[in-house]
Image (cartoon, helix red, strand yellow):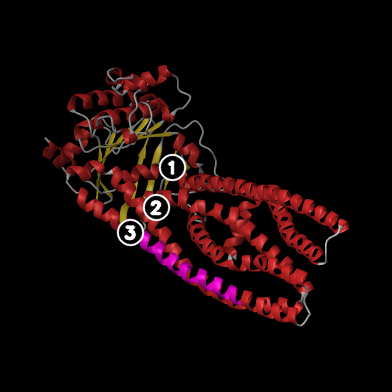
Amino acid sequence: MKMLWKLTKEASRYKGLYIIAILSTLLLTGVNLAAPKVLSTMTGIVGSGLNDETLQQIGNLALLLLILYMLRIVFRFLSNYLAHKAAWYLVGDLRDRMYHKLQSLDLGFFHDKQTGDLMSRVVNDTRDFELLYAHMIPDMITNIMTFGGVLTILLVINWKLALITCFPIPLILISGVIFAKKVRPFFKASQKCMGQLNAKLQDNLSGLHEIQSFGQETQEAQLVSASNFEQVRAMLRALKASALFHPSVEFISSIGTVLVVAVGGYLAYLGQLSVEDIVAFVLYLSLFYAPISGLASWLENLQQSLAGAERVTLILDTPSAIENKADAKALEQVNGEITFDNVSFHYSNQVPVLKNISFTCKPGMMVALVGPTGVGKTTITQLISRFYDPVQGQILVDGNNLKDVTLESLRQNISPVLQDTFLFNGSIAENIGYAKPEATREEIIAAAKAANIHEDILHMPEEYETQVGERGLRLSGGQKQRIAIARAILRQSPIIILDEATASVDVETEKQIQNAINNMAGKRTIIAIAHRLSTIKNADMILVIHEGEIKEQGTHAQLIEQNGLYARMLRAQS
């Protein structure tokens, strides 16, 4: 019930459409209840003998019946369409909310999540809300009104026979409760399997080059097939329970029909029930048992909808570990001073990644982070952008604790160039201009020249309008990285983070990119991660990170003179 109440609050913004749809449903129920009464009255008139007066009455009743059937079309259209309209708008709203929520969550949330499963929740599980609000709730209202109305009419016609008609209802309700408890875990398992299947497909399609390169097509096809049929089997377990429940409900309902026919015939034999009442009873009987017989399908759809709703609300209710404080202020006129004050950090596994990191980077300085892989260099840069918060100590920008400023203003003043360059499926101009949507073509070209990618672009089929493909598939690694550098240059942020910015380029291009970086030096604060030590010789300060700690600190010349870790790394590369 808590889940249903939460979902109802989500749908309340479309209450106008729902109110009209519900009123149409109630009027439709009234029409359905009136039609059998008109038919039974006509039967009674025919049974009592025909004359001019009765023929006129039959004509009037026939016209009334035609009007009722026409009204049924109007009310059914309004009921179905408006309920669907409200439900699909709700689905669209929920998908938007899911996407915005996922964008707002911290990176730690995604460490144990698969992209395909999250996509399944956004696209597939939200679709179950349409089933709930466009079908189940209107059906529930219709069935309750129909059942109550028919029961009242049957009690008026003959209360004894009406009570006999109700005999199967407790049995159906008890079996429905048992069915609901049994089938819901099956639907939850099915939707979980669907998410895993989507995750596997997304993973394999992204890694298709590797699959073909290592000849693993057969093995991966078997894994996808196993995941696929695991979802099929989970759904079949749910449908097996439904296949047993549906005919059971129909059989129990048919017992009531048999009792009504037998007892009704006996009452007619005793003269306690007229032919007109028998016809009315039989006509209303199908309306009476229809809601009860439909209970099986209703419960099945309810369990499927709630299973999807649980997966959706689990995301929507997840708090983000990185959020703006209520009194957070926006950064203005950032100079680019960065201070780490006794910063320690670990991920959710509690294994220390950084231990007591302290340093200050003055505005316009270039600070290089060097050291073996996995010692926390990238983590330091992610802490600067506040993708994570330190577990101890504080990080300051221009003297402001990052926790006291808004995320938007902080990240607007930082331009990252990552080793794993991501390009969107669009044109080169769109990817360079992504950091500054209002940029002119002249500004985009100037940034491309600064990153030494302009000449390459001019040799492409459509120059700046050349499509890069998904994740930049149509470009070389070096081209993608230089486009990412152009994107960072275009933004003109006071702080630039370079995470192995020259890792995928040749020596000549590396020199040209290094010249572009040197041109920015002194004008912007640069935090650079580098394994090629030749690229950071001109850095104002080099931090040698080892096992999560700063082991050495100084300029290139000072560190060579110390003849420690940095000097050994430099000799190894030479």
Amino acid bearing label 2: Asp
Camera-side residue of 175 and 256: 256
Amino acid bearing label 3: Phe
Q: Which residue is mark 1?
A: 396
- Assess whether residue 398 is covered by the magenta stretch: no
Q: Which residue is mark 2?
A: 117
- Is residue 559 something that shows in the picture? yes
Q: Which residue is mark 3?
A: 229
User: Closer to the observer: label 2 or label 3?
Assistant: 3
Label 2: state its secondary structure.
helix
Measured in 3D between alpha carbons, the distance from the residue under mark 2 to the one under mark 1, in whole angstroms, is 37 Å
Q: Which residues are magenta?
A: 228-255
Q: Give the crowd class for mark 3: few <14, some 14-19, many >=20 residues within 10 Å.
A: few
- Percent across and percent down for residue 68 are 75, 52
**Left or right relative to 501: residue 198:** right
In the image, residue 179 sits, relative to residue 146, either above or below, namely below
